[in-house]
Image (cartoon, helix red, strand yellow):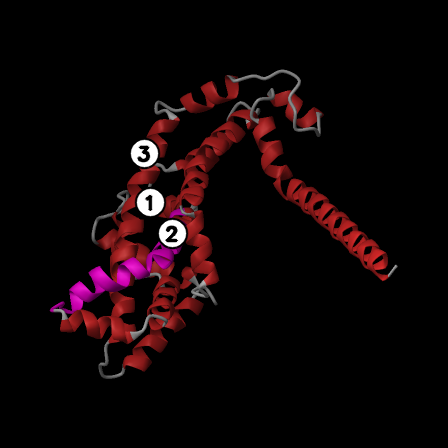
Amino acid sequence: MQTQAIQSTSVHHKKKIRWSTFFRYVLLTVIAFLMLYPIIWLLGASFKSNAEIFSSIGFWPKHFKFDAYVNGWKTGTEFTFGTYFINSFKIVIPKVIFTLISCSLTAYGFARFEFPYKNVLFGFVIATLFLPAVVTRIPMYILWKNLDLLDTYVPLIANTIFAQEPFFVFMMVQFMRGIPREYDEAAIIDGCNSFQVLIKILLPILKPALVNVTLFQFLWSINDFLTPLIYISSVEKYPISIALKMAMDTSGGVTPWNQIIAMSIIGLLPSIILFFLGSKQFMDGIQAGGIKG
């Protein structure tokens, strides 16, 4: 009798767990759908006609049209959208590479070496996190103008050579402080110098942090609109962000929203692909506690 009661309780408990799991998955699915709905609507709208976008709230088009992708790619200028894609990569790829190199070296110095006024200097670096970008905008513009480097990509890239992003320096320092110094000492005993310790020992361990830096810098740079707008004046040098804004400025009075949405979808693809390629390392970096503000 007691055994039957225990079995009945066990079966009831299992049913309760199954129903709880079922409702949890249903709830998560609904929330995920609501959060992804703008992206799904955007994807559907790229296949609609310009009139249908504003006449229907649903995301499924009545008739699939690829005209928006074809005409949007041609753009209203003498250059195709491919030119603007290439221009964006001319800015983004050097920025990511220089950021990885400069921030790693700067963080290595602060995390592993002792020198006069180290804490004060590190405090200055962190303090620049709170400096509004607008404060330096006019002086930097005058500097690049005096150097006759306006309408080039140099003003957009050069700052990253000098570890200009304090957030990344801070993040890398936090990661390096979590690595035991015994690793460095063992490598030095084996004959490594300081540079080899960084390259052969620390950077492989810092892979999640490096992926985080790559992802953040890539996303911030490819979506940046204001900085290229200030320094770039030639249409053939425009990146994607300005090209999309330029497509909205039509003199005919009709904005081709379906073409703009279609090109926005294409513009999102590099960021989405890069995120999924580095998603495992990105999550490892978050779990390691490297990003704590």
Near mark 2 (Cα within 10 A), the count class, few <14, some 14-19 or many ≥20, is: many
Secondary element at image label 2: helix
| Bounds of the magenta segment | 191-218
| Residue for badge 3 | 86
Q: Nearer the viewer, mark 2 or mark 3?
A: 2
The tag earlier along the polypeptide, 1 or 3, is: 3
Labelled pair 2, 1 in contact (Cβ < 8 Å): yes
C-alpha span from label 2 to label 1: 8 Å
C-alpha span from label 1 to label 3: 10 Å
Secondary element at image label 3: helix
**Rendering coords of residue 236 (x, y %):** 31, 32
Q: Nearer the viewer, residue 65 or 24?
A: 24
Q: Is residue 239 above or below residue 161?
A: above
**Rendering coords of residue 73 (x, y %):** 42, 23
Horizontal arrangement in the rendering, residue 3 relative to residue 230 (left or right): right
The tag earlier along the polypeptide, 2 or 3, is: 3
Labelled pair 2, 3 in contact (Cβ < 8 Å): no
C-alpha span from label 2 to label 3: 17 Å
| Residue for badge 2 | 217
Q: Is residue 201 magenta?
A: yes
Q: Quadrant of residue 107?
A: bottom left
Horizontal arrangement in the rendering, residue 23 relative to residue 68 (left or right): right
Res. 92 mark: 1
Near mark 1 (Cα within 10 A), the count class, few <14, some 14-19 or many ≥20, is: many
